Amino acid sequence: MDKDYFSNGGIQPPLHFEPKIPLNSLHSPQELNSDYFMNTHWDNNSSDQYTHFDSALSSMVSSPVPTNSLNSNDSHSSSLRELIGKLGSICNSPSPQFTYDISSINNCDSTRTSCYTTPLNSPPKLHIKDKLPNSVLMNAPPFSCFDTRSFNGRSQVGLNNEKSSYGSVTGLNGRGNLHRKLSSPSLVQNKNAGKTQVEILKLGKISGPNANSNEECSVSKQVKSVLNSRKRKAVSKGEGKNYETEDGKRDKRSNSTEGNGGKNGSVKMEEQKDSESDEAEKGAKANQKISEPQKDYIHVRARRGQATDSHSLAERVRREKISQRMKFLQDLVPGCNKVTGKALMLDEIINYVQSLQRQVKFLSMKLASVNPRMDFQIDNLLPKNICQPNGSLHQHVFPLDGFGENLTQLPTICEEDLQSIVQMGFNQNSNQDLILQSQTFPVPNSESHMKIDM
Amino acid sequence: MSSSSTISNPDANSNRTRESKRKKRRKIEVEPQNTNLDQSKWRTDTEQQIYSSKLLQALRQVRRSNDSPSRAIRETADRVLAVTAKGRSRWSRAILTGRLSLRLSQINKKHKRAKLNSGNNIKSRKPVVKKRLPALQRKVRVLGRLVPGCQKLPFPNLLEETTDYISALEMQIRAMTFLTGLLSAGGTADQLG
């Protein structure tokens, strides 16, 4: 039976992959087989390094692809062709391979058309041999090197999902597992794994703007799974507290695809694709944090070339929280835009809060002076006050006529004092503004001043 | 709501209204701590109107303290501001629950420090190496003391409280400026007229 698989399309016999791959369970639907059949054509174009992997996939092919369905879903095929062409133009070694596999699984119909068109498109360039020999390692190790425990678990998940929509979910899960496991040993060995990660992310970025959502969704998911593997590997060394979030995220995504697989899930897939492509874009840039706050939990990625233990990740999350809140404060506090750095901004904020509190104090002093008048006929004031908070003062003159008689009787403060207080308040305000602008107000003095106030 | 309590009892003693507010505040305090404090609410006119009206009501009932009427008014204004905040922010709760106790504790601390310092001066003049915290930490402490009730808060939470507090203070200043301008202008107009 295996020989039959191998005989299709002149595929090179897989040296490393054994039929004990649990993927056998996935090959029952015929469409999946056709997807794998497409890989054979790619195998012809790809280098020897891919053949091992691709041949394993192609081993699932049980029968030749029927030509009847070739003409269906032209749009899918065209978009897929575009995707493949773009992928081919990239010098990324492992990524095209991954994407081909995934997209093949997802689009049953389109693959049939595309498998005949891919040879026409530019094949994926094979710079891997030169640039990233480690990627070969990613492909080379046999499936048996997988961590069987987790792999079986994943495959079971894939199996469970098979019922609802086998096409996208199971294949994705299966492939995702495979890819994850494949990449992990190489990442352990290789320091340059980040390179592949970046390239994969670039792939995800380029695939992002494509129209068809399914492929890109799968592509970026594949990208994600590689990243997930890397992150999970690092986390498992440490506390592994993000482990559940990773799994939860994957399961969440799988569930969402599950729900949309059968129906027209393009909308939701597009949303996911957008978020993922954004993520991929972010990740593609060097030294940029990749943290995507999901609805349920905060998902943090290990930064490229940075430590991936949970402590530094938590620290990064904390730092991002702080910087986010400092940005809010920057908008509030005037004159904070020019200042950079936490210390200087804190200085500005402290000065501003102190100035505001001083303003409140002066205003309360003013109110205190005015307060004796408020005892009389304050009811007249209230309704008008509420209606027109920003109205001109002229409108309020009339209801305040009642005050006039009482005003002259008050010996406490005369108008000149009030005006002086007001001017003092304004002067103080302007002084504070000047102080803020010149930033000459020393902090220790403000401390002592504050103590006196308190 | 606390606002309804103040409006329904305009003639009640300020103490009683404060207590009722405090009780209602404790019920509200069950809210989760991670609520995002929306600072834009302080910019709205309605908030300012609410605050102004409440402030007027409260000012009518202020017990005139002879030593510093301005301080009494300032405290009233802060309390009304905290009430307007509906207890969602930590500083507002701190203002309402224990401003007096806070001041007393600070005075006690000052007394203790004074006693210690005097004792040290008498004994010896050893070069005391002051433990200087990093500049950032010092500033965080200062900010923590400025915002009421946020003295020992972790830094990100402190920043959140500060944003809300700054917006609230700005609204308070706007309302009080308007009130004082209103009242003083009323006075001047009558004097002129």
Image: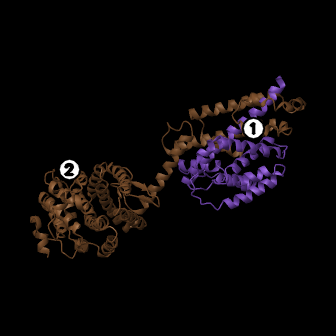
Foreground of the two, A397 or A364 = A397
Question: Measured from the top left, where is residue B163 in percent x and y?
Answer: 58, 46
Label 2 marks a residue whose chain is A
- Mark 1 = which residue? A385
Q: Is residue A252 above or below residue A392?
A: below
Question: Measured from the top left, where is residue A399 in percent x and y?
Answer: 81, 32
Instruction: Give the number of marks.
Output: 2
Q: Is residue A85 above or below residue A144?
A: above
Q: Residue at x 72, y 46 (%)?
A: B78
Which quarter of the rendering shows the N terminus of chain A?
Answer: bottom left
Chain A tint as drawn:
brown
Q: Residue at x 69, y 49 (%)?
A: B84
Q: Amino acid at mark 2?
A: Gly
Foreground of the two, B69 or A384 = A384
Q: Residue at x 64, y 47 (%)?
A: B146
Whether residue B105 appears in this view of the structure is no
Horizontal side of residue A101 vs A8, given as left or right: right
Label 1 environment density (alpha carbons within 10 Å; few <14, some 14–19, many ≥20):
some
Question: Measured from the top left, where is residue B150 in percent x and y?
Answer: 63, 53
User: Helix, strand, or loop for circle 2?
Assistant: helix
Question: Measured from the top left, where is residue B131 in percent x and y?
Answer: 57, 53
Q: Amino acid at mark 1?
A: Asn
Foreground of the two, B174 or B134 = B174
- Mark 2 = which residue? A85
Label 2 environment density (alpha carbons within 10 Å; few <14, some 14–19, many ≥20):
some
User: Helix, strand, or loop for circle 1?
Assistant: helix
Which corner quadrant of the image does residue A35 belong to?
Answer: bottom left
Which corner quadrant of the image does residue A31 belong to?
Answer: bottom left
Chain B tint as drawn:
purple
* Furthest-top residue in this view: B192
